[in-house]
Amino acid sequence: MKQNRVRIYEQGSPSVLRYEQAAIGAPGPGQVRLRHDAIGLNFVDSMFRDGSFGVSLPFDLGVEGAGVIEAVGGGVENLGVGDRVAYYFTPGAYADVRLIDAEFLMKLPDDVSTDLAAALTTKGLTAWMLLKRVHPIRQGEFVLVQGASGGVGSLVSRWAKALGATVIAAVSSPAKAADVRSHGIEHVLASNDPDFTATVLAITDGRGVDVVFEFVGKATIKQSVQALRTGGHLVHVGSASGLPVSKDTSSLAARRIRYTQPSTPQYVNSRSNLNAASSELFAAFRAGVFGEIDPARYRLSDVVRSHEDMAARRITGPAILIP
Ligand SMILES: NC(=O)c1ccc[n+]([C@@H]2O[C@H](COP(=O)([O-])OP(=O)(O)OC[C@H]3O[C@@H](n4cnc5c(N)ncnc54)[C@H](OP(=O)(O)O)[C@@H]3O)[C@@H](O)[C@H]2O)c1
């Protein structure tokens, strides 16, 4: 049997992505063969591609997918042919069909489509980690989201608002600002606004925000520190613009700012907390917290263009690849 997959033989620009055919065997013990309906596009994929993370080559890209089980290996319990499932943070997702250990899979509720699961799982579990574990949101808190138009940032902004926070969203362009506003976020600022800090202080009655969720890194982290209240929490989730040159620990300490740098697999790391987190995530979706999620769609064979668009910041919100 054949699979269509995306593999890299060297790290670099999007042009290193090779869409190719390869043989695929039967599932081994503990494995299933999964036919993807949709594959999540995540910023971390570009970091595996461009060399930000070391990988052993050749490397099969993609960490998230959703689809239907086609065949089951020995010893697999609780999953069978025809089950609709999804997974997150398991490399090798950029393929129409793949082998995967059954232990990484979660069954999807009937009302969660495989397209939605591929768009929502990794990003939504990250939002869950941030808002429910790393900085549980309290009613009335002021929250700044740097990178609020992104896949994770858009979910964090909407969920924090639903939990009772006043959200200040930072974005780079008027089109992205309009999209973020259309989801009910009232305060949307341009991240390059020279009056950024003054505006944040005006919105927060001179105090500064309680917490920043920082997805952009190098380009904005200084501004994030300035926007925080004394004793606030700087949650450094990602560095889409590059890693900050250095962390100014003395100025953080002088203002009693707590700095954390969490990663989703540290918090969603067992079957029981995956079940708990995904139940809360899908319940929030059903309750309308995220509004309509209409991910940008690319053909898997058009993967180079999807990475070009991600690098050029042309995508707003989540995106998926369709085999
Ligand atoms: N710690 C974890 O476990 C974890 C989990 C998931 C994601 N992350 C990280 O969180 C960040 C966001 O992930 P995502 O999947 O939501 O990515 P994404 O959809 O591509 O969003 C990134 C956002 O950052 C902004 N940005 C600012 N400068 C940028 C630049 N030079 N290049 C690209 N984007 C830039 C863009 O918005 P504007 O154009 O409006 O500025 C973009 O919407 C990434 O750094 C990712 O690695 C971390």
Image (cartoon, helix red, strand yellow):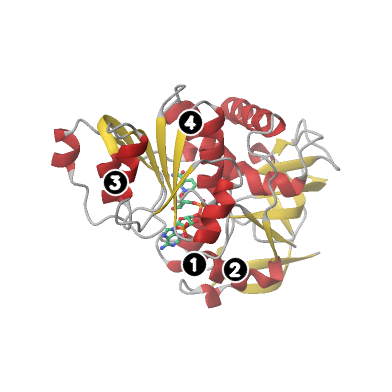
Q: Dividing the picture into quarters, in which one does residue 52 lie?
A: bottom left
Give the class, few, some or many, for how many residues have Cα within 10 Å of label 4's Cα (few <14, many ≥20).
Answer: some
At label 3, which amino acid type do we have? Thr
The alpha-carbon separation of the residues under discs 4 and 1 comes to: 27 Å
Q: Are marks 4 and 1 in contact (CB under 8 Å)?
A: no
Please give left or right for residue 217 compared with residue 20 in the image.
left
The alpha-carbon separation of the residues under discs 2 and 1 comes to: 18 Å
Q: Dividing the picture into quarters, in which one does residue 203 lie?
A: top left
Q: Do the residues labelled 3 and 4 touch (CB within 8 Å)?
A: no
Q: Residue 7 carries which label?
A: 2
Question: Residue at label 4?
Answer: 131
Please give left or right for residue 218 compared with residue 125 in the image.
left
Please tell me whether mark 1 sits on a helix, a strand or a loop. Answer: helix
Question: Which residue: 50% across, 64% down?
Answer: 313
At label 4, which amino acid type do we have? Leu
Quick one: label 2 or label 4, which is nearer the N terminus? Answer: 2
Which tag is nearer the camera, tag 2 or tag 1? 1
At label 2, which amino acid type do we have? Arg
Give the class, few, some or many, for how many residues have Cα within 10 Å of label 3's Cα (few <14, many ≥20).
Answer: some
Q: Is residue 213 visible?
A: yes
Question: Residue at label 1?
Answer: 311
Say which quadrant the N terminus sits in: bottom right
Quick one: label 1 or label 3, which is nearer the N terminus? Answer: 3
Classify mark 3 as within 8 Å of ligand 1 or not, answering yes or no: no
Please tell me whether mark 4 sits on a helix, a strand or a loop. Answer: helix
Question: Which residue: 40% across, 32% down?
Answer: 142
